Amino acid sequence: MRIAGQVSIDDIPKICPLLSRAANPQYGEKGTRVVDVAGVRFGGERPVVIGGPCAVESHAQTVGLAHAVKRSGADMLRGGAYKPRTSPHDFQGSGLEGLCILSVARQETGLPIVTEVMDPRMVKEVAEVADMLQVGSRNMHNYALLAEVGRARKPILLKRGMSASLCEWLGAAEYIAKQGNLDIVLCERGIRGFPSGEYSRYVLDLNVIPAARMLTFLPVVVDPSHATGVSAMVEPASRAALEMGSHGLLIEVADFRFGEPKCDGLQAIDAATLARIVEFAHEKSGVRSQESEVGSTEETQPSPTLKAAATLP
Ligand code: PEP
Ligand code: MN
């Protein structure tokens, strides 16, 4: 029986002519597109570690944490100025003031910034501060936002929808690519499963890492913080993700001396734990550089299809 709208991973080359490995043989079986974010290379020699608060709450909290993230050896700073909260009555982020704080944090530490944009009308403002734009799990299906960030000419961190299949996730990435922006990093952040909320927040889908890497040449990273929702699980989940081939990690960090975080305090780790994760990630770099020697197509010229996409408005 055939069902309307049903797709399988065999359809990915058709759904994603710009991003699927099969439709872009120049990447070979293992090559990864290196996505460069202000000198930080996703899919490069070693895994990338991004740390920072869930939300930008104050100058002292975010700039203080940025220095701690820097000292831990991590590569980039995260922090939401705009927060997608379950209740509209909860803290929604500090908005434009939060963006200003992020830019101070970058100035003081030199760490490139990734921050979420939720509204197509805000892409320009957020892109002025962000080195990388994050599309959150709840917005993975927001096609107007995907097209708008695709036009922003900034690298994109595309989180997997919490109930999205791999086909839907890659299809969402293709919306960004269709605007000529192939600088996309995929981020697995946990999916809904029957035990979600019982002993962990979501189910960390480790299996999707090799599956995604097989089907697309885009780098894939993991957010062990939202995937587990439990700070004690973040370090082992990070190691597991790297063992499964993740190109990096996006991790929430807190320092309770700045007060209890307004959101997601229970899943935040401290800077010392982040430093241990960074050390583990760096140990893996030997393996990575061998891999990229075999498979990297970083210098590969874009295919005619990619060139055509790059000239779209
Ligand atoms: C976040 O990383 O700040 C976030 C809100 O995550 P997600 O979109 O995965 O829930
Ligand atoms: Mn959070």
Image: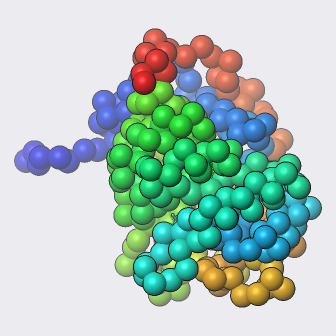
Residue lying at the far right of the rendered structure: 71
Q: Is residue 236 left or right of residue 146?
A: right
Determine whether 227 is above or below 212 in the image: below
Q: Position of residue 94 (x, y in %)?
A: 62, 70
Q: Residue at x 72, y 58 (%)?
A: 100
Q: Is residue 58 visible?
A: yes
Q: In this orientation, which residue lies closer to the viewer: 267 or 292?
A: 267
Q: State the image quarter where residue 313 is shown.
A: top left
Determine whether 196 is above or below 282 in the image: below
Q: In this orientation, which residue lies closer to the viewer: 65 or 12?
A: 65
Determine whether 228 is above or below 119 in the image: below
Q: Is residue 1 left or right of residue 185?
A: left
Residue lying at the far left of the rendered structure: 1
Q: Position of residue 185 (x, y in %)?
A: 58, 44
Q: Residue at x 74, y 74 (%)?
A: 58
Q: Residue at x 39, y 73 (%)?
A: 193
The count of marks equals 0
Q: Is residue 91 left or right of residue 235?
A: left
Q: Position of residue 155 (x, y in %)?
A: 60, 39
Determine whether 289 is above or below 146 in the image: above
Q: Is residue 49 visible?
A: no
Q: State the image quarter where residue 60 is shown.
A: bottom right
Q: Position of residue 158 (x, y in %)?
A: 51, 50
Q: In this orientation, which residue lies closer to the viewer: 67 or 127?
A: 127
